[in-house]
Image (cartoon, rainbow, N blue to C red):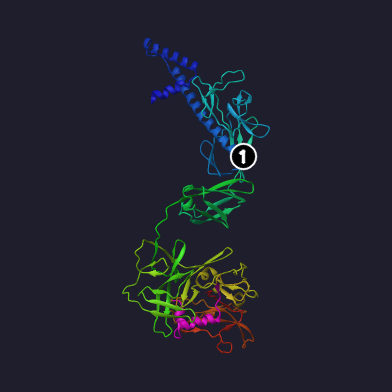
């Protein structure tokens, strides 16, 4: 290895220099054998080291220049292709430019270097061509036909021959010496570079060339626009003819062009990428794997590319969804089983109470799906395997206990959607998770638990919205005729997540809508149905949470989980929040004429710490009618439509 390295070094030393070195070595050998031991050969050794150092520098110079030439071609292609720069990163010898198409450009900048023997020069038409510097003269490099060589075309490769002269080759062609105007070869020497400097600001990157004019090339940055496939797998697998969708996020994108493998279909609409695989009939002529490439442009016509790898796979044997019954319902009393992005069953921790009161207990009940809703006529009690059949017309239940001696922990969803405790087909676990209502209003996002009480679905949390459903902000001025809100003790930091939001009656009746989409504020009749189902005894206890109540704590048998958040009534001296007595009030959407106040009032229902009742009387003729003026502030529990 050492001998071959020395041979390469020797070969790159100019002939005259090699002869001088040989003569010096010969004299050194004669002196060593014929003279005294005091002969000093340090000067000769220093000359040899200088020769080695020059060869090393030439090798480095060749490597850097050839990198510069490749980079220059990339820069020109970047400018012509309207490609932007994502980032500029120092790399020790210069900079690495990361482009929007995923490629990189290496720039070795040297402000003090000479113009290289092969350089670039712009023609009058603004196109850059390769040129040759000889002394102070710069001439075009020409091909065999006498045509100039554009930088965007072939890239020269520079070298040094055995005699120490510059050579150039193009593509796979042989290396030839570079010659000056008189036809003499040009000795390889000097410290040269194609680029002087790289600078950037928020909008552009500026690359200054090492040429006579100090030309600066400006390339726009492209970080201000983007398009991302947010849920893309490493490889998206399709069965024949299958269509899959993928969410995309885009910013400042003006135009999109999509390329795809043969016989695939791809389109973007409403921030969704839809891809369809070829059918089995086209398998012989279709590309069964490849990339869906999305080329996107900003207003300045800069482009970027993102892609999704796709592949057709053989159809999988259908799997049966397997559901493990949850034991933890703290995240929500209604949970959903999801398989292949589809809800396949619903599991509820709920109060099952027959009309005669012979059965009254909290059960975990699982329901199959009928369309997008649970089939309440086919519920299964997971404790015994018994049937739970609801009558939506009168809000009652028929319960028949099963014979299981231990709770059933696993169910299977059969091909017809029904539930079974055994299955002889391959199965795969479904995801079981709380079925939360996610309410988004502008930048406000709230999540609420659900609870099923008989055939009604209620929110298990008080509403916390500070915007109406149409996105209009709700006022905090309690005198506002369009409605207002406030928090317990006027302290949202401590109480918003606990008690929710207190609303004026005007907010409840606002045409802007207070309930989330698909939900409503319950009417008086809805509360009557709730009260009837819960039963005539200790109704309030079953609706109260197990915490925070003092004299008569709750059992929360219903899952309604009401907390004593008080109510609000403005006064001239001090705002009142229930006068310190634990209780809570809920608005209905029913407005009636109140003969006592001789004005319209809104029906409410109330839970009180000093008794076990649900206080609710929507009869305006009753002395105990539960009606308040719109200036009162109560909580809101929503009911699913």
In the rendered view, would you say 538 is above or below 461? below
The quadrant where residue 99 appears: top right
- Counting from the top left corner in percent of width and height, residue 538 is at 44, 84
Looking at the image, which residue sits at the far top?
A: 34
Residue drawn at the location 42% of the way across and 25% of the way down: 5
Q: Quadrant of the C terminus?
A: bottom right
Most extreme residue toward the front, as rendered? 281
| Whether residue 401 is situated above or below residue 39 in the rendered picture | below
Residue found farthest to the right? 124
Q: Is residue 250 above or below residue 425?
A: above
Q: Measured along the vertical axis of the image, is residue 428 above or below residue 558?
A: above
**Residue stretch rendered in magenta on the structure:** 519-545
Count of numbered badges drawn on the protein: 1
- In the rendered structure, the answer to whether residue 593 lies left or right of residue 496 reads right
Magenta residue check for 540: yes
Left-right relation of 84 to 232: right
Tell me residue 104's x, y (percent).
53, 40
Residue at the spot 45% in from the left edge and 51% down from the top edge: 312
Q: Is residue 589 magenta?
A: no
Q: Is residue 327 visible?
A: no
The residue located at (42%, 85%) in the rendering is 356
Which residue is depicted at the point 42% across and 67% down? 416
Front residue of this view, candidates 571 and 542: 542
Q: Label 1: how many residues lie within 10 Å, few (<14), some (14-19) or many (20+)?
A: few
The x and y percentages for residue 3 are 39, 23
Left or right placement of residue 240 versus residue 567 in this view = left
Residue under circle 1? Answer: 80
Quadrant of the image occupied by residue 515: bottom right
Tell which of 184 and 574 is nearer to you: 184
């Amino acid at each position: 290895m050492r001998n071959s390295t020395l041979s390469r070094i020797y070969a790159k030393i100019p002939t005259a220099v090699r002869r001088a070195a040989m003569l010096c070595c010969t004299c050194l050998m004669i002196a060593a054998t014929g003279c005294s031991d005091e002969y000093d050969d340090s000067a000769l050794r220093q000359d040899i080291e200088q020769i080695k150092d020059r060869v090393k520098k030439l090798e480095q110079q060749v490597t850097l220049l050839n990198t510069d030439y490749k980079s220059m071609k990339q820069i020109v292609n970047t400018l012509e292709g309207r490609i932007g720069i994502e980032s500029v990163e120092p790399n020790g010898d210069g900079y690495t430019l990361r482009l929007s198409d995923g490629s990189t450009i290496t720039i070795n900048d040297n402000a003090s270097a000479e113009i290289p023997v092969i350089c670039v020069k712009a023609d009058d038409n603004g196109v850059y061509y390769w040129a040759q510097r000889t002394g102070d003269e710069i001439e075009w490099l020409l091909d065999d036909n006498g045509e100039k060589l554009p930088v965007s075309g072939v890239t020269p490769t520079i070298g040094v021959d055995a005699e120490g002269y510059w050579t150039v080759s193009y593509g796979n062609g042989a290396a030839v010496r570079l010659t000056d105007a008189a036809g003499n070869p040009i000795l390889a020497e000097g410290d040269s570079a194609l680029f002087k400097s790289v600078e950037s600001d928020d909008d552009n990157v500026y690359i200054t060339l090492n040429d006579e004019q100090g030309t600066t090339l400006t390339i726009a940055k492209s970080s201000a626009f983007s398009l991302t496939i947010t849920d893309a797998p490493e490889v998206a697998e399709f069965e024949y003819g299958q269509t899959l969708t993928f969410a995309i996020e885009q910013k400042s994108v003006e135009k999109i062009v999509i390329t795809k493998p043969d016989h695939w279909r791809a389109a973007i609409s409403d921030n969704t990428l839809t891809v369809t695989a070829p059918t089995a009939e086209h398998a012989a002529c279709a590309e069964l794997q490849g990339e869906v490439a999305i080329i996107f442009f900003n207003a300045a016509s800069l482009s970027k590319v993102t892609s999704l790898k796709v592949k057709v796979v053989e159809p999988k044997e259908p799997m049966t969804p397997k559901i493990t019954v949850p034991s933890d319902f703290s995240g929500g009393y209604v949970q959903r089983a999801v398989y292949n992005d589809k809800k396949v069953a619903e599991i509820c921790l709920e109060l099952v109470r027959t009309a005669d009161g012979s059965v009254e207990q909290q059960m975990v009940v699982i329901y199959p799906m009928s369309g997008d809703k649970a089939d309440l006529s086919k519920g299964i009690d997971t404790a015994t395997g018994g049937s739970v059949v609801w009558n939506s017309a009168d809000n009652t239940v028929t319960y028949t206990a099963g014979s299981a001696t231990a709770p059933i922990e696993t169910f299977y969803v059969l091909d017809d959607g029904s539930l079974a405790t055994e299955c002889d087909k391959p199965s795969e676990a479904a995801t079981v998770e709380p079925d939360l209502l996610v309410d988004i209003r502008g930048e406000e996002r709230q999540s609420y638990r659900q609870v099923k009480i008989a055939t009604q679905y209620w929110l298990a949390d008080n509403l916390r919205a500070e915007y109406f459903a149409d996105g209009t902000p709700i006022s905090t001025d309690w005198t506002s005729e369009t409605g207002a809100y406030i928090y317990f003790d006027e302290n949202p930091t401590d109480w918003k997540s606990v008690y929710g939001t207190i609303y004026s009656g005007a907010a409840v009746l606002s045409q802007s809508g207070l309930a989330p989409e698909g939900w409503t504020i319950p009417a008086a009749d809805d509360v009557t149905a709730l009260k009837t189902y819960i039963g005539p005894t200790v109704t309030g206890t079953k609706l109260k949470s197990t915490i925070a109540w003092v004299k008569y704590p709750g059992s929360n048998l219903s899952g309604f989980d009401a907390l004593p958040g008080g109510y609000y009534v403005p006064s001239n001296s001090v705002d009142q929040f229930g006068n310190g007595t634990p209780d809570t009030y809920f608005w209905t959407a029913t407005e009636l004429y109140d003969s006592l106040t001789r004005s319209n009032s809104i029906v409410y229902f109330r839970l009180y710490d000093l008794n076990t009742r649900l206080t609710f009387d929507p009869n305006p003729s009753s002395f105990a009618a539960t009606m308040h003026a719109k200036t009162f502030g109560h909580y809101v529990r929503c009911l699913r439509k």
